[in-house]
Amino acid sequence: MLKQCEGSHAVAEAVALCRPEVICAYPISPQTHIVEGIGEMVKSGELKDCEFINVESEFAAMSVAIGSSATGARTYTATASQGLLYMVEAVYNASGLGLPIVMTVANRAIGAPINIWNDHSDSLSQRDCGWIQLFAETNQEALDLHIQAFKLAEELSLPVMVCMDGFILTHAYERVDMPTQEQVDAFLPPYEPRQVLDVNDPVSIGAMVGPEAFMEVRYLAHAKQMQALDLIPQLAQEFKAVFGRDSGGLIRSYRAEDAETIVIAMGSVLGTIKDTVDEMREAGHKIGVLGITSFRPFPLVEVAAALKNCKRFVVLEKSLAVGIGGIVATNVRMAVTGMGLKGFTVVAGLGGRAITMKSLTGLFEKAGRDELEPVTFLDLDWNVVNKQLEREKQVRRSGPAAEAMLRDVGAVAARNY
Amino acid sequence: MSALQTVKFYQTGTFTVGNRLLAPEDRSVQANMQRTNSLNSGHRACQGCGEALGARYAIDAAMNATNRQLIAANATGCLEVFSTPYPETSWQIPWIHSLFGNTAAVATGIAAAIKVKKQKGQGQDVRVVAQGGDGGTTDIGFGCLSGMFERNDDVLYICYDNGGYMNTGVQRSSATPSAARTATTMPLGPEPGNPFGQGKFVPAIAMAHEIPYVATATVADLRDLENKVTKAMGMRGARYIHILVPCPLGWGTASQDTIRMARLAKETGVFPVFEAEYGELTSALAIRRPLPVEDYLKPQKRFAHLFGKNPAVETIARIQAQADKNIRRYGLLAKETV
């Protein structure tokens, strides 16, 4: 059914259609509307046979999820930013124990300085935590990915993060095609755990493992993600058969067939990039796009294949590996090892900095002329940065950088001392 | 099976082999799978471990009270490490270890899953116990514990309190008693050992949550312990039992003195044994023969710096004052018993 609704609400409804049994919620922007929506459905009785637990922290949220998933209940939670970092120990534990929890990450920057706006620093900080990470481009895809995520998680017995851009998707009202309960039931069978806490067949879960088997256990986690490389496209096919639309998969190309320059990105910024590429195509530029849906597992082979005919690639990412540059870019470079391609890393949109078509056009034209620096910070205010660097050179007690720079840009509430 | 049998020890290389890996005729009585013991022999606890004893009695009682319809969540710590070294386990019930600080929350999740499964007609009425040491309960696991209490989740949480982080080598926790020596509160400087005025008594904090049931117990009075666990399993909602379990390694006491030390803790008033329902004290185990705290402190090497040639009379008096306060607050003298 077509409807106009907020991204968070679309996800809440989609999760409810997946018949979750335990949901734990702790508020953090910009994820709150999702669990609020589900909480309402549980409270009103619209969503039956589901326990909704208001926990005292994200660490508890993931821990409750661990307990309920290990007891055989389909389990969901959502978080963002600081919340994801606060639960990290339990995040690793959930994947280590092979528990198919599904969690939405409403992507948001990480402080300090505290910032509630969108970038991908939170989920990318968890790139090695053992969870599958899927990135949604639109609200429709966010909705669809959740339905696929439960199936993927439960088939592999691995947890799945569905990452959607905070505010840009979570708070945007867009038209979505909401599936029916019958469709979701046809796609997603009831959860059958591989191992469960069962009084009729007692097992001990979470034993201490020493050097004699630890590496093997870790390898198996890797092997499972490698299986996901086959399963994710397969599920996207199955999904299409039931729901009639393309959603998910590992990667998706756009106007890339004869492209000399391919721009690689994840999430909602792909929309702006595609619009920019459309305009540039009209102006005669041979440019295309590669969207990465599955960041973990990272589709090395597929990315290499998608780039094999281009001359150069630009990875535009909403994340920064401080001290080296890009996170997504590093992964892409791994995929194109030995292909002799020129690659550029562009760090953009940190902490909600707008990524405009105007800036992108200039950036891509420069890339097309091979004039980009290896690592570019899109729309960085060099004036402010240089002022601060100078200040720090002059005065040892130069004060907090964030506040000083806010004063330089003349931001509201910044006081001149 | 009740016939006495010589205790057998097996050692292969650096790994102690659990009894259950041996041929049936070579196994000890405790290794029999038909026994109701929740915690089988072959585990790797130290000799005289109070926690192993407390856990076996507590979980046995919970198993009996629930007709074995029981799942346990376990915090990281001695109990977890000595009971489940891969690929062995001493547990006869479904058991999960997740992390150090999240056991109460994991138990909440288990209880929630059971509730939904039961609603759906897919499961039995299974009960949940969470357990951990004092570090995992009063320190790192305290947030999750308080959350579980405050939501009144249907979980019995059992804390085995040995007054420190014994698994990592006897460091100080918020349950370490005043003046005690630990690896991080050495008997040095002007105030040797663990400082006075610090630490917390979690049973009292549990009572402040007004949960249905709070009790304390020691391994010196195992019937009392069993009764309290049985009573707790007959109730619903959040319940908390705090058991004093002496640690020969951390306390510097002889292995055969574990039960004696627990009894002395109770008889001196150092550790009050009581019950509370919905935040109100309902009963206390009376001290039968009041003893001075010295009787409890002296046998323990962790308090050795208080004695010797120049006894720390003032410090001992402060510990005595703490015990006296317990006796007043919880009505521990027979005639004052609530």
Image (cartoon, rainbow, N blue to C red):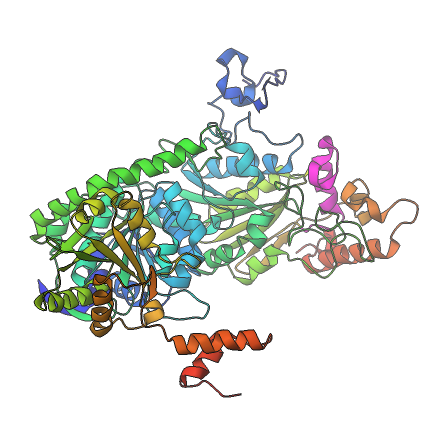
Question: Which residue does the image show at 64% across and 31% down from the upper left?
Answer: B46
Outermost residue, bottom side: A416
Quadrant showing the N terminus of chain A: bottom left
Between A229 and B112, the residue placed more toward the observer is A229
Between B191 and B259, the residue placed more toward the observer is B191
Between A7 and B319, the residue placed more toward the observer is A7
Q: Is residue A2 placed above or below A293 in the rendered structure?
A: below
Outermost residue, top side: B25
Query: Which x, y percent locates residue A340?
Result: 26, 47
From the viewer's perspective, is B134 left or right of A117?
right
Q: Main secondary structure of the magenta part?
A: helix
Residue B110 visible somewhere in the drawing: no
From the viewer's perspective, is A129 left or right of A335?
right
Q: Tally the numbered discs.
A: 0
**Residue stretch in magenta:** B249-272
Quarter assignment of residue B194: bottom right
Residue A11 visible somewhere in the drawing: yes
Q: Is residue B256 placed above or below A190 in the rendered structure?
A: above
Query: Which x, y percent locates residue A163?
Result: 28, 57
Q: Is residue A299 placed above or below B336 in the rendered structure?
A: above
Quarter assignment of residue A344: bottom left
Between A271 and A44, the residue placed more toward the observer is A271
Question: Which residue does the image show at 29% across and 44% down from the upper left?
Answer: A337
Outermost residue, right side: B309
Query: Which x, y percent locates residue A398?
Result: 56, 77
Q: Is residue B270 placed above or below B52 in the rendered structure?
A: below
Query: Which x, y percent locates residue B49?
Result: 64, 34
Question: Which residue does the image show at 35% across and 72% down from the upper left?
Answer: A380
